[in-house]
Image (cartoon, helix red, strand yellow):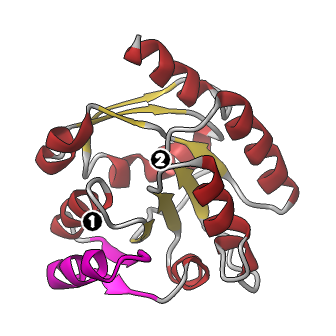
Amino acid sequence: TDMKSIETVGLIGLGKMGNPMARHLLARGYKVFGCDPVADACGRARALGVRITVSPREVAQAAELVIIVVGFESEVEEVLSGKDGVLAGTGARPIIALASTVAPRYATRLAERLRDLGVVLLDIPLARGEAAAAAGKLLIYGAGDEASFEACRPAFAAFASDIFHLGAAGAGQVGKMVNNL
């Protein structure tokens, strides 16, 4: 199936990784929406041209691809399932790309949970760190639905120089763990 190319990208988390990712996406002509609980992070992103929203739910309603760049599983749960979370949206079904580093089992379970809601989860933990993020040379060990992944690849290429699709959701987290060893 030929999926239409993605033009709007949402970033949940506009900190050390999210901010440079936003900058690279904007430079490639994407419309970028974002939110972050830290006002400073929002201010810096707004200065780049990111359209700031008040909640993950609003990001999900505005964007075709939502990239989650928060630290931990508890934060991932909150931005997805909290009362103003991505999944609280009325029928908005963006592709969700989880860039946070989480347990492979969690990524697998989350993908199944979202599939039941008609939402595609791509597992895309980012490797190489802040300097690579600033340079647009992150490494993505990606996993999840292949057609969706390919539709998102040009957006990922805005901030990642090496992008691998390793299989079903959860495989990306395994790939990153192996890389970190």
In the rendered image, the vertical position of residue 145 relative to residue 10, given as above or below: above
137 lies above or below 23: above
Q: Is residue 61 magenta?
A: no
Q: Is residue 17 left or right of residue 9?
A: left
Picture layout, residue 91 above or below residue 146: below
To which residue does mark 2 refer? Answer: 99
Q: Secondary structure at mark 2?
A: loop
Q: Which residue: 46% across, 38% down?
A: 125
Instruction: Give the distance between the C-alpha atoms of the residues marked 2 and 1, in whole angstroms.
Output: 13 Å
Task: Write down the residue under mark 1.
Answer: 22
- Part of the protein shown in magenta: 30-53
How many residues crowd mark 1 within 10 Å: few (<14), some (14–19), many (20+)? many
* Image height of 104 relative to 62, above or below: above
Disc 2 packing (10 Å; few <14; some 14–19; many ≥20): many
The residue tagged with tag 1: helix, strand or loop?
helix
Instruction: Measuring from the top left, give residue 107's x and y in whole percent.
Output: 68, 39
Q: Nearer the viewer, residue 126 or 36?
A: 36
Res 145 quadrant in image: top right
Q: What's the residue type where badge 2 is placed?
A: Ala
Q: Position of residue 44 (x, y in %)?
A: 19, 77
Q: Is residue 32 left or right of residue 149?
A: left
Residue 104, x across and y down, in percent: 66, 29
Q: If you read the primary sequence from the N terminus, does the residue marked by circle 2 or circle 1 appear first?
A: 1
Do the numbered discs 2 and 1 sit on residues whose CB atoms are within 8 Å?
A: no
The amino acid marked with disc number 1 is Ala
In terms of depth relative to the viewer, which is nearer, 140 or 13?
Answer: 13
Q: Residue at x 47, y 59 (%)?
A: 67
Q: Residue at x 51, y 83 (%)?
A: 62
